[in-house]
Image: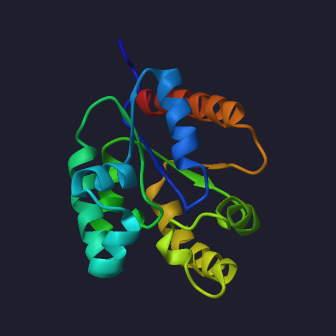
Amino acid sequence: MNTFPNIFLIGLMGAGKTTVGKQLAKKLHLEFIDADHELETRTGVSIATIFELEGEAGFRCREAELIKELVDKPGIVLATGGGAILNNETRQSLHQKGVTIYLRARVEDLWKRTKKDRQRPLLQNTDPLKKLQQLFIERDPFYQETAHFAVDTGNHSVDKLVTTIEKTINTYLTTYENT
């Protein structure tokens, strides 16, 4: 029987939510769901197309509705989109309905991981590094508010991050159950 609650991964694009989430779900025998991929599957179009047709506001509305539904699904590791935490209701749901982990990375590391990715609408501008810095400044307080704990991704391997997260969740659950 699975003893883990739902696990929600938050953080900026390139932090490793999908990569770490897949491995974490596998190790803990949970279902992995990537919110962006799920939204693409349901709409039949890419995130970039949703941004193009509906703007960021339209995308965020769709994202919030999807996450509202997914947080109630049992036995999952959910990788949210980087901006999901911009919605207050989403922040509250993530914090209340599972264990939320902020995968934190330095802006320079995020840039290295995302600079060749042409599928990230917010980085399709003349200075994507500056945009990442701006997003970090704007969103970090929301990530901190929403998360039960943060894990710095740095140059750690995915296996090390998964082990660290598993141990931290176990410690958190033990502490939580004894209070």
Q: Image height check: is 169 above or below 1?
A: below
User: Which of the 4 image quadrants contains residue 78?
Assistant: top left
Q: Image height check: is 84 above or below 152?
A: below
Image x and y of residue 28, in percent: 48, 22
User: Which of the 4 image quadrants contains residue 4?
Assistant: top left
Image x and y of residue 167, in percent: 61, 28
User: Which of the 4 image quadrants contains residue 156?
Assistant: top right
Q: How is the image coloured?
A: rainbow
Residue name at image x 51 percent, y 68 percent: 120
- Tell me if 25 is positioned left or right of 19 in this view: left
Which quadrant of the figure contains the N terminus?
Answer: top left
Residue name at image x 50 percent, y 62 percent: 143
- Tell me if 127 is positioned left or right of 74 in this view: right
State how many labels appear: 0
- Tell me if 87 is positioned left or right of 102 in this view: left
- Tell me if 176 is positioned left or right of 154 in this view: left
Q: Image height check: is 107 above or below 42?
A: below
Image x and y of residue 92, in percent: 32, 58
The residue furthest right is 155
Task: Pick whichever, 47 or 65, lies toward us.
Answer: 47
Which quadrant of the figure contains the C terminus?
Answer: top left
The residue furthest bottom is 126
Task: Pick whichever, 178 or 167, lies toward us.
Answer: 167
Residue name at image x 39 percent, y 20 percent: 3
Residue name at image x 40 percent, y 65 percent: 85
